[in-house]
Image (cartoon, grey):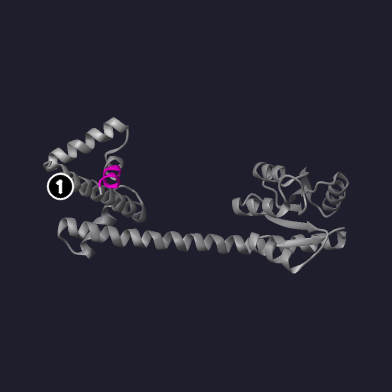
Amino acid sequence: MRTAIVVDDEPITRMDLAGMLTEQGFTVVGSAADGFDAIELCRTLKPDVVLMDIKMPIFDGLSASETIIREEIAGCVVLLTAYSGRELIERANQVGVTGYLVKPVEERLLLPTIEVALAQSIRLRVLRQEARTAQRQLEESKYIERAKEIIAKENSITEGEAYRQLRQMSMDKRCPVGTLAKAVVENHSQKELVDRAKALLMKCESLSESGAYKRLQGLAKTHGVTVEQAAREVLASIR
């Protein structure tokens, strides 16, 4: 049994729409009079369908729809509007709404519109997931390449050997190569940050390397921050 939420600031309209949905085999699990309450209901109930009026107080339908679609807390959103126009359709498409009905809603159009909206929402969700996966893989590749360079340079080995080391470490630690590579890069960046701050303190205050590091440790303790954060503050304050 598929579930639905009806959102409209007119109680009679909500009742009529709920009745139509029930006739079409949906279970109406909630209703709301504004977009804010609609979002909260969706976060709790995760309905298959949201029938959403556009013009409402507090939080309008398009804004609420954008949040619901971004958070993926409903199967699809079908907008209800008293008029149809190119501007509305363009805004709805930008938000990710996959269906709309002109009020007063004709029951014969309700189910076909919902079915198309659900199918289109599934396709869009798959595309978004694929895009996120591709972006994550790209970022992981960048971290792996940088980690290979760091390991190769620090150990005077080839990048091929560095990659084998990285793979072996990932297996030993039961950690994805990309995650481990990111940790290697971030740790190296923090070390570079501290080294730059030490060099600056050595130059500006005539300190030894150990003296500069002790100075960073003292600053970190005084301000209740990490040595890396203290190094960043030193670099920002001494030009």
Magenta part of the chain: 233-238
- Disc 1 crowd rating (10 Å Cα; few below 14, some 14-19, many 20+) is few
22 and 68: which one is in front? 68
Side of 72 relative to 230 (left or right): right
The location of residue 117, given as percent across then percent down, is: 71, 62
Q: Is residue 98 magenta?
A: no
Q: Is residue 55 visible?
A: yes
Query: Looking at numbered disc 1 in the image, what kind of residue is underneath it?
Result: Lys
- Residue at horizontal 51 percent and vertical 63 percent from the top: 131
The location of residue 25, given as percent across then percent down, is: 81, 53
42 and 197: which one is in front? 197
Q: Main secondary structure of the magenta part?
A: helix
Side of 227 relative to 138 (left or right): left
- Residue at horizontal 79 percent and vertical 65 percent from the top: 84
The location of residue 1, given as percent across then percent down, is: 75, 50
Tag count in the figure? Answer: 1
Q: Is residue 93 above or below residue 8?
A: below
Side of 117 relative to 173 (left or right): right
Q: Residue furthest bottom?
A: 86
Secondary element type, mark 1: helix
174 and 57: which one is in front? 57
Specify the quadrant of the image occupied by residue 227: top left
- Residue at horizontal 83 percent and vertical 63 percent from the top: 109
Specify the quadrant of the image occupied by residue 24: bottom right
Task: List the residue tagged with mark 1.
Answer: 203
- Residue at horizontal 63 percent and vertical 51 percent from the top: 67
Q: Is residue 171 visible?
A: no
